[in-house]
Image (spheres, coloured by chain):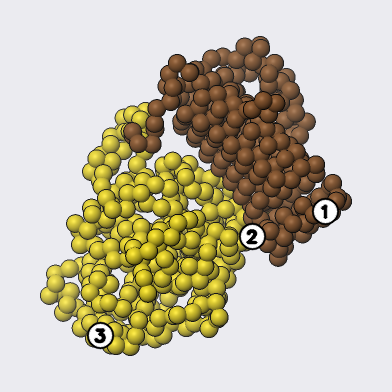
Amino acid sequence: MLRIDCEGKHFSQIGQMIRQTAEKEIFVDNAQGHRYIAAGVGGKNIIVNGTPGNALGAYLDGSSITVNGNAQDAVGDTMNDGLIVIHGNSGDAAGYSMRGGKIFIKGDAGYRAGIHMKAYKDKFPVLVIGGKAGSFLGEYQAGGIIVVLGIGTDSKTNVGYFTGNGMHGGKIFLRSEQLPDLPQQIIARKATAEDMAEIEKYVGEYCRYFGGQVEEILNRDFYVLTADSANPYKQLYTSV
Amino acid sequence: MLREGEVRIPSGCAISGIISRRGRLTNGEKIITSIATMHDRSNGLGGGFAGYGIYPQYADFYALHIFYDDNEIRKEAENFLYRNFFIVNMSMIPIRKTKRISDEPLILRYFVKPLDARLHETNLDEKEFVARMVIKVNTTMKGAYIFSSGKNMGIFKAVGYPEDVGEYYRLEEYDAYCWTAHGRYPTNTPGWWGGAHPFGMLDYSVVHNGEISSYDANRRYIEMFGYQCTLMTDTEVIAYVIDYLCRRQGLSMEETAQVIAAPFWSTIEKKPPEERALAEYLRNAFSGLLITGPFSIMVGFEDGLMALNDRLKLRSMVVGEKDDMTYIASEECAIRVIASDLDRIWSPKGGEPVVIRVNREDK
């Protein structure tokens, strides 16, 4: 086991220590915005205490990361494989371009969670958000699954504007009473038993990390959003 | 030396703010600690701070902070000031020499009031008079630049990392009920002292992380009303837009936010009738002041602070609260480092302003 105290260290030193150690279990304490923690790292179990900086677990390649606190922007940016568990909220762009592995966020995610997520061959990324998500959830999503559980929120929808904007693959599951306003190229439907079977294990995993009853969570309305390939995305940014 | 607009450098920035709703004072060291946590968001080409409530002994005077290239232009500018203002106090701004801050201009501070005779002659109200004099100096006297012109507030800025700039200006000697800070990473232009943030006009100060795509449209619009963008840097135009909308048009900070980060028409359509009418009015009446492109900004004003993200929220901004204190920063770590125990922490939505107003106990 290795303990790294971030106090007074630059992020590059912390990165070096994580890459160079033969230890499999690493505690990163007093994180204060240190960026790129565990970037590209495989085969380790990393526990972060404090507030890790942007791009936590970027290009992660098989390690598991637990954050005891909130994470900032771009958690798991382009991650390839592994697991990130955040006992708090995440900033913007969580799971940015991830193409494999799983991210579990106990609370809320900021804007653009799951932007550019994609699946490839045996790679299948999963992003589970326990609370609510900001606007542009799953923007340009091309593969994998995003689940928003809306636990502890009292709003009827748990996402912001432009959910699935530019989406052309993958699925977004929303546990909510009603659908948000959606871009025209999105098909939304009530989740079927088959759909639910697909996410049951991820909800189970969420409850193992953060508590809660699987049946209670699943026993509510879920909507599934997919891309309408017959009605592809047209530009947003230059037309409004 | 090549200045703003003459060179293009490709690239973030950091912002941080502290405010007490009760007007309690915070020492300058705190804001330095906060902004320093985000060191890597800057590249050493600009840092700066604005403090409100720092000059209680001269609270009724405009505090002019001026950079001069040399004593010749200083003499010329001071002659201009003598003709227009009663100067109750003038001095060099106290600094602490450090190797990390170099090529400094002359930096002076004047506490002034417009001469009654000049106000009478020009038929202008006091604030408008001061604003015009600031613009006059900045546009006609090459080598003189008034970078702070409010009452009981001051801007301190330089080329360097923000923590070094804070040390240079001895911010530990100032206490403010509201502080803002900026660490610069110039994206389009080289850094020079005047181009560092905050940008000010009277009591308004702006710090900004982002890049304004609509700069030229905004500049052309605002220059119709007597402002002149002399720095070729995008944040300058925001300071003038705020001054124009708040002071001259009398809009509230919330309305001003709705002008510069107007909701999409598709979002406006879904609002309840009354909100919709206001949103449509503001978007139509001030269409030239819609600011597009990614930004998070903080605007300091006489009794408060406004923070705002662009409507697409292409920059990060986090707000933390503890009792009467509100902390705002580009990253959560910059808040936690000075306030580990918070009642609440959240990220405002794009285009939704956070406005904190101060009820000062000493007033």
CA–CA distance in space, label 1 to label 2: 28 Å
The residue where tag 3 is placed is B76
- Left or right: residue A33 versus residue B270 is right
Query: Mark 1, mark 3: which one is toward the viewer?
Result: 1
* Residues at discs 1 and 2 in contact (Cβ within 8 Å): no
Q: Which numbered circle lies on residue A109?
A: none
Which of pointers 2 and 3 lies earlier in the amino acid sequence? 3
Chain containing the residue with disc 3: B
CA–CA distance in space, label 2 to label 3: 45 Å
CA–CA distance in space, label 1 to label 3: 64 Å
- Left or right: residue B137 versus residue A111 is left
The residue where tag 1 is placed is A21
Task: Estimate how packed mark 2 is, as few (under 14), some (14 to 19) or many (20 or more) residues with alpha carbons within 10 Å.
Answer: some
Q: Quadrant of residue B127?
A: bottom left
The amino acid type found where label 1 is placed reads Thr
User: Which percent across, then down, holds residue B302?
Assistant: 38, 63
The residue where tag 2 is placed is B337
Query: Mark 1, mark 2: which one is toward the viewer?
Result: 1
User: Which percent across, then down, holds residue B214?
Assistant: 32, 49
Q: Tell me, yes or no, whether dots 2 and 3 are on the same chain.
A: yes
Chain brown in the figure, letter: A
Along the line of sight, the residue nearer the viewer: B193 or A40: A40
User: Which percent across, then down, holds residue A190?
Assistant: 56, 14
Which residue, as the protein is rendered here, is positioned at the far front?
Answer: A121
Q: Quadrant of residue B155?
A: bottom left
Judged from the image, the secondary structure of the residue bearing numbered disc 2 is loop
Chain containing the residue with disc 2: B
Q: Tell me, yes or no, whether dots 1 and 3 are on the same chain.
A: no
Residue A108 visible in rendering = no
Which residue, as the protein is rendered here, is positioned at the far left?
Answer: B121
Image quarter in which the C terminus of chain B is found: bottom left
Which residue, as the protein is rendered here, is positioned at the far top?
Answer: A193
